[in-house]
Image: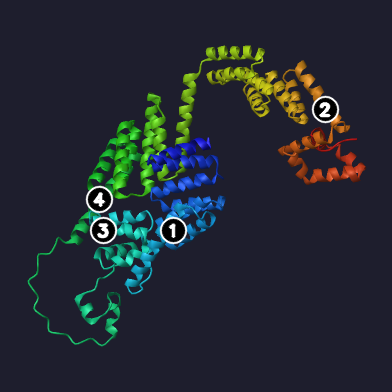
Amino acid sequence: MAEEAKAKGNAAFSAGRFEEAARHFSDAIALAPSNHVLYSNRSAAYASLHKYSDALADAKKTVELKPDWSKGYSRLGAAHVGLGNLDEAVAAYKKGLELDPSNEGLKSGLADAESALASRRRSSGSRGGAGASPFGNIFQGPELWAKLTADPTTRAYLQQPDFIKMIQDVQKNPNNLSMYLQDPRMMQVVGLLLNVNLKTATREDMERDVPPMAASHEAKEEPLPKKDPAPEPAPEPEPMDVSEEGKELKERKAEAQREKEKGNAAYKKKEFEEAIEHYTRAMELDDQDISYLTNRAAVYMEMGKYEDCIKDCDKAVERGRELHSDFKMISRALTRKGSALVKLAKCSKDYEPAIETFQKALTEYRNPDTLKKLNDAEKAKKDLEQQEYFDPKLADEEREKGNEYFKQQKYPEAVKHYTEAIRRNPRDAKVYSNRAACYTKLGALPEGLKDAEKCIELDPAFPKGYSRKGAIQFLMKEYDKALETYQEGLKHDENNQELMDGVRRCIEQINKTNRGEVSPEELKERQAKAMQDPEIQNILSDPIMRQVLIDFQENPRAAQEHLKNPQVMHKIQKLVSAGIIQVR
């Protein structure tokens, strides 16, 4: 299954569907968490999505699992380059080349990283050795774009391509921040992210050669003589008052929040039409908050208007991506859409759209509630398929075909028909018993044991299930377990000859072991199997039982007293039956 998920991931990656590829690789990792190739592949997918932090985490895991694999260092270097960690990228590529000196990919990566590092150092030197910016790290994290969108001044900058490019450059390489500090837009952004008001230099400050941030200390110094003011040119028409625009926007946002709160109150009272009116009004006042859309979608869901709910969720996702909204909000919209699709699937009998939507939501944010909804949808799909396939009449026909092949000793063919019978009627205990017999003939004992246990689960009073299970355990040389199975079966049919014969064979084999009539190799094999039994492990780790076993060797009188305890006696018999201890 892990290989299948990996193959799907590779195909999606080749087609440029990187989010889908990452999801398939995640599924494969869940099935094979120690496979270093899967982490390497997912790292490449995340890097293609510019999720360099996630790419770095997977690259580190790849190297941890397989430190002698050169490609892991290639992934590590690429992730560091994406994050602007050029020194670490160079070190990673060099480490990979130590393992594989002829690797062209590593050579190319190293050359690019060293070139970028040299360029950065030259740029830093040309600015008087300013070095790395102390504020570069504030540009990291998904909340950056949300803050820029929320502020009325910086929101206007988002319409300017050169501004977008400038911010993206600083995100990729924080040390480049100092290149843009002469741009007043960048100073505005830095002030916003640091939550301070960065004052730009005034003419008076420039004349007095006083840094703007130090202006508050000027009163302590001797003031310079004032010059006669030069005649000022006629003032040009001033642009619209930004503060007034910001004030109006702030008021609209506040009004939108009040409408949202009214909508929430109406929703709790199940006054759905009124709630929709308030959420719609909030959207008209402020189109920068997609929560109004997702809230209205929730109302439509409660009203059973699933198509309207889906439309609002789609709008929320589209608008959220335009605004660079929090990924949790995008995930919430997709999850709500998936829930609406599940409701529709109860009529359409098609759960696949809901499953795909939940999977997309999980790529945005791995919410436990979304994961549960995905699992429920997948289970509903499976149950529906089983219901549509359920046909007891066809199941009986397949079982009879299996019986005919079994009589002809064509066991693989018999298994095929028994399996189809189970698909047609998974509640028929007899067909599990029959397939267990086939697996026993084929030597597939674990599969046979599983079928026998399923048979007993479906019909605890069916003796054949116990005889099948006991026979398989006997063949696996687990004589103590086989004895218990036969004895349990006799509780339901005390005169069953097959079960009584099974008890006799087990006792004979256990007695042979106690008399030392089995080969050392067989005894060693039995003991090794027994030691894997959790019940045996618990008995041997019990301090009281350890003392009992010591007394059996060193203090026979105390040992006789121990045997008067029924619980101790049962555990001793369990160890004897398993071949762990022998009674001479």
Q: Of tags 4 and 1, which is closer to the observer?
A: 1
Mark 4 — residue?
255
At which x and y percent is residue 566? Answer: 82, 35
At which x and y percent is residue 359? Answer: 42, 38
At which x and y percent is residue 290? Answer: 30, 45
Question: Could you say which is closer to the camera, residue 521 or residue 191?
Answer: 521
Q: Amino acid at mark 2?
A: Gln
Q: Quadrant of residue 478?
A: top right
Mark 1 — residue?
110
Mark 2 — residue?
509
Instruction: Rate crowding at label 4 as few (under 14), some (14 to 19) or many (20 or more) other CA atoms within 10 Å.
Output: some
Q: Say whether residue 23 is left or right of residue 297.
A: right
| Separation (CA) of disc 4 from disc 2 | 85 Å
Instruction: Rate crowding at label 3 as few (under 14), some (14 to 19) or many (20 or more) other CA atoms within 10 Å.
Output: some
Residue at 47% in and 57% down? 93
Residue at 40% in and 40% down? 14
Q: Amino acid at mark 1?
A: Leu
Between disc 4 and disc 2, whose residue precedes? 4
Between disc 2 and disc 3, whose residue precedes? 3
In the rendered view, would you say 493 is above or below 361?
above
Q: Judging from the image, what secondary structure is the residue with disc 1 in?
A: helix
What is the number of the mark on residue 163?
3
Between disc 1 and disc 2, whose residue precedes? 1
Between disc 1 and disc 3, whose residue precedes? 1
At which x and y percent is residue 562? Answer: 86, 40
Q: Amino acid at mark 4?
A: Glu
| Separation (CA) of disc 1 from disc 2 | 68 Å
